[in-house]
Image (spheres, rainbow, N blue to C red):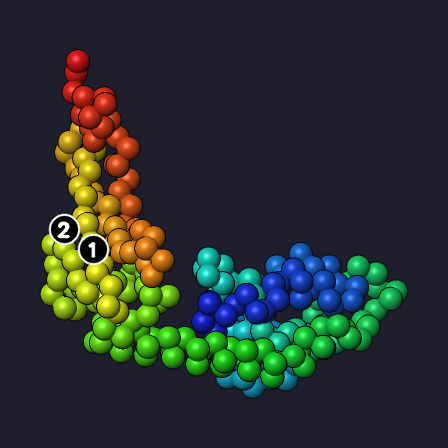
């Protein structure tokens, strides 16, 4: 399957997988699979080329940091095949190849992991559809659904645009303020965008959509004479 990096945290890392191959030198094994390519499965394990490439892609799954260091249960299955066909250098030749019981358990965990992924996909799609609906029906937004990004999208969609604007959302008056802040050289500027509202208990709430990197510069501080010479 094509793995979304969001779900990669469900999978084992290279280091964990190779640690479950008995008597294997993990670093050398990882180095081998990084350099060898899917042809190793064709050569040693009699895989068809397309099948080999499909399985091989499941040994190098990217995480949310863009690092391809995750292995799916299907990927682990072909590593077991390579292991049993003497692809990896062993720590002790006298011990030889043993049954990778723990890694086999991970291979058999494929169905459970796939079910978790499918459930998360359904939840994410439900959230996406709910958000799409709320943008079109702002009066139905619950206060516990308030977020700076949703409030901003609702205001844009309803043409409520400006540096200091208000809109009734979910029966609550929500304000949006855009504050400009200058760099000390005054050659560039950026903004802080803040949403504010009063909750049901009467407490003032706020969420920041964008924070200025210049906000605390002396050029924006009256106590420091706006950064001007005294």
| Residue 58 appears left or right of 89 | left
Q: Nearer the viewer, residue 158 or 45?
A: 158
Question: Which residue is found at the position 14% from the left and 51% from the top?
Answer: 164
- Label 2, label 1: how many angstroms apart (C-alpha)? 7 Å
Q: Position of residue 75 (x, y in %)?
A: 60, 75
Quarter of the image for residue 166 reads: bottom left
Question: Which residue is found at the position 18% from the left and 21% from the top?
Answer: 225
Residue 45 visible from this viewpoint: yes
Q: Nearer the viewer, residue 228 or 130?
A: 130
Q: Position of residue 141 (x, y in %)?
A: 29, 71
Mark 2–mark 1 contact, CB under 8 Å?
A: yes
- Tag 2 secondary structure: strand
| Residue 215 appears left or right of 111 | left
Please tell me whether residue 190 is drawn above or below residue 27 in the rendered image: above
Please tell me whether residue 30 is drawn above or below residue 59 in the rendered image: above
Q: Nearer the viewer, residue 44 or 164?
A: 164
Q: How many residues crowd around disc 1 within 10 Å: few (fewer than 14), some, or many (20 or more)?
A: many
Q: Which residue is mark 2?
A: 164
Residue 39 visible from this viewpoint: no
Q: Which mark is residue 6?
A: none
Q: Position of residue 202 (x, y in %)?
A: 32, 55
Q: Which mark is residue 175?
A: 1
Q: Quadrant of the C terminus?
A: top left
Q: How many residues crowd around disc 2 within 10 Å: few (fewer than 14), some, or many (20 or more)?
A: some
Q: Position of residue 201 (x, y in %)?
A: 36, 58
Question: Which residue is found at the position 51% from the left and 77% from the top?
Answer: 117
Among the two numbered marks 2 and 1 on one chain, the one whose residue lies closer to the N terminus: 2
| Residue 143 appears left or right of 228 | right
Identity of the residue furthest to the front in this view: 201
Quarter of the image for residue 95 reads: bottom right
For the image shown, how many numbered marks are present on the structure? Answer: 2
Question: Which residue is found at the position 58% from the left and 78% from the top?
Answer: 113
């Amino acid at each position: 399957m094509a793995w979304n990096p969001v779900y990669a945290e469900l999978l084992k890392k290279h280091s964990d997988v190779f640690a479950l191959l008995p008597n294997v030198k993990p670093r050398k094994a990882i180095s081998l699979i990084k350099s060898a390519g899917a042809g190793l499965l064709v050569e040693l394990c009699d895989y068809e080329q397309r099948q080999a490439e499909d399985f091989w892609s499941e040994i190098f799954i990217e995480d949310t940091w863009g690092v391809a260091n995750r292995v799916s249960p299907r990927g682990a299955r072909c590593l077991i095949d390579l292991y049993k066909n003497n692809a990896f250098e062993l720590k002790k030749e006298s011990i030889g190849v043993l049954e990778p019981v723990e890694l086999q358990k991970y291979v058999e965990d494929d169905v459970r992991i796939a079910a978790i992924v499918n459930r998360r996909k359904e939840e994410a799609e439900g959230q996406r559809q709910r958000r799409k609906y709320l943008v079109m029906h702002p009066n139905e937004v619950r206060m516990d659904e308030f977020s700076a990004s949703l409030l901003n999208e609702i205001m844009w969609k309803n043409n409520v645009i400006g540096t200091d604007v208000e809109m009734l959302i979910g029966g609550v008056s929500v304000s949006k303020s855009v504050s400009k802040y200058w760099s000390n050289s005054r050659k560039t500027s950026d903004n802080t965008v803040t949403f504010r509202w009063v909750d049901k208990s009467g407490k003032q709430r706020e969420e920041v959509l964008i924070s200025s990197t210049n906000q605390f510069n002396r050029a924006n501080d009256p106590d420091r004479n706006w950064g001007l010479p005294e």
